[in-house]
Amino acid sequence: MTAERVLRRGDDSAVLRLSEAEAAEIGNDPTTPLDDERVLLNMGPSHPSTHGVLRLMLEMEGETVLRSKPVVGYLHTGMEKQAEQLTYLQGCTNVTRMDYASPLFSELAFSLATEKLLGIEVPERATWIRMLMCELNRMSSHLLFMATNGMDLGAVGMMIYGWREREEVLRFFEIVTGLRMNHNYIRPGGVAADLPDGWEDEVVRILDITAPRLDEYDVLMTGQPIWRDRLQGVGVMNSDEALALSATGPLLRSTGYAWDLRRHESYLAYDEVDFDVIVGTYGDCYDRYAIRLNEIRESMKIVRQIVDKMPGGDYRVQDKKVTPPPRVRIDESMEALIHHFKIFTEGFKVPVGEAYASVESPRGELGVYIVSDGTATPYRMHVRGPSFINLQTMPHLMKDGLIADGVAIISSVDPIMGEVDR
Amino acid sequence: MSDEETTADDTADDETPAPESAAPEADISSDADESGSAAPSAERYGAVLADDGVLHTDAEGYLDVAAAAKDDGFDQLIDLTAVDYLTFAAPRGLPAGHAAERFEVVTQLINHESGERILLRVQVAADEPMVPSLFDLWPGAEALEREVYDMFGIEFAEHPDLSRILMPEDWIGHPLRKDYAVGSIPVQFKAASNIR
């Protein structure tokens, strides 16, 4: 009988390797729960604390989670297949919808991979604008984490505060890119538009607002005994486990393992700014919370340096095959009109080859792997979504814990389902 | 894939550090020796995969090469994916004795100590798409291999739970294969009389 086989399976694995059909069979079986009182519990996909459409199958004994299995795919829209139909210029509109809390990182990774294939180098100002926008995006993404993590753990006020601060950043994004989310701002060859006049004042204003509010978060959460009791020692993982499970980002750093692509495989101009890689000690939910809180501070530090150091020059590469000509040129030059038309209808051709580019997104290593067959659309585009891979740690973090702690763990892994399912 | 068995053994046994440019199948030990000055793969691979070493292997030698890589300090599996070369004869830079097959499974490993990354490429035949699972070496391969199975129909032997992960369990077909249609929804004009 399936139920017997599954629920009494004598492995001490944390992962419940059970198909949905088997689970349904057990659910319909009148003889379950068995006499050892293990039950299968389904959580999600529409559950307020599952951050979208994550579903968990939990094998429970009382309130204790024995084994679990994240079931994903509810948001799968075939974006990797879709990428094969879209030109490299359109590609950014596709990938930006994956990790919708930090869309600029997907755009950046896609652009870096495309530029590697094209063999072009973007102007310095474009690099620094990318860095500015990404660090602001890291702030907004971690602020969103602060909001949802607080809400998941009962600090409901925190949800409003986190959202309030995030909105300041998104408002700046709207000024620069025209959109609050899904910007399509970072493109192969540079960025879509130069920063507007007075951007420094706006950025400094955001930093000045955010800094004291992060200190308020400390008062509200960091030092509070209830908050600490709720998170400390919950969902513990060590570095070896994190490495084995391919975890990256705050999840890996929380175990005390200092690995940040910005530092260790420096891209853009991160080697020219000063920042610290935040690591934890115990690898628990509290460390992951504290890492993200302090990464906001580090990002603010980077943004301040960018404001001081922003170089002049062009915001995109002047390669007529890749960059659309300025609007005024179209009225004057037949060639400009042709180039403009060609770029937006056929797209630009990318030499045969393949490239992998990765960036440190707020969730870990976000990589884009492109195989080009020499046409204007990628032959294959694969995204290494950190959320998707980090999700594998969840059963191990939840094992032998309480189901109420499971909510804290889901929150601290911080998966974005758009990126998980793609 | 039987005609490639001998090459797999050759690759695994080749312990001598090979010259950088002329060693497309340079085995893992030579790679580790050169970790300070990693061979530019642009020459080795004939592609623009900058700063990455590439190791070609076939399904038989795959696990051995991967295990050797793990012993040499490649402590994390970063990425695992596949490419269906059905409609594109890519210059894959395969060493002699390795035949290009329809599928290629690409695994990326990282050595945090030296900061080195390598790509492990294994050719997978269309008629028997099966490679060993890396789960025992890096448990993090589990979800990625399930994704490749789901999207390409490539099976991973000894995988603990080889099932669909993104598509529904009862789905037929493997969407990222090149002969899987993209699909489309007919868009109709508002004026048309037969709106669905």
Image: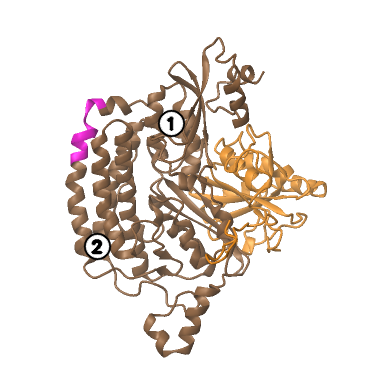
Residue A352 is tagged as: none
Q: Position of residue A140 (x, y in %)?
A: 31, 50
At 59% from the left edge and 27% from the top edge, which residue is drawn? A24
Mark closest to the chain's N terminus, 2 or 1: 1
Q: Nearer the viewer, mark 2 or mark 1?
A: 2
| Amino acid type shown at disc 1 | Asn
Q: Chain of mark 2?
A: A
- Tell me which residue sits at (42%, 22%) in the image: A401
Q: Which mark is residue A238?
A: 1
Q: Residue furthest front?
A: B193
Q: Which chain is orange?
A: B
The tag on residue A307 is 2
Answer yes or no: do the residues labelled 2 and 1 have beta carbons within 8 Å? no
Chain in brown colour: A
Query: Which x, y percent locates residue B181?
Result: 66, 56
Magenta part of the chain: A216-226
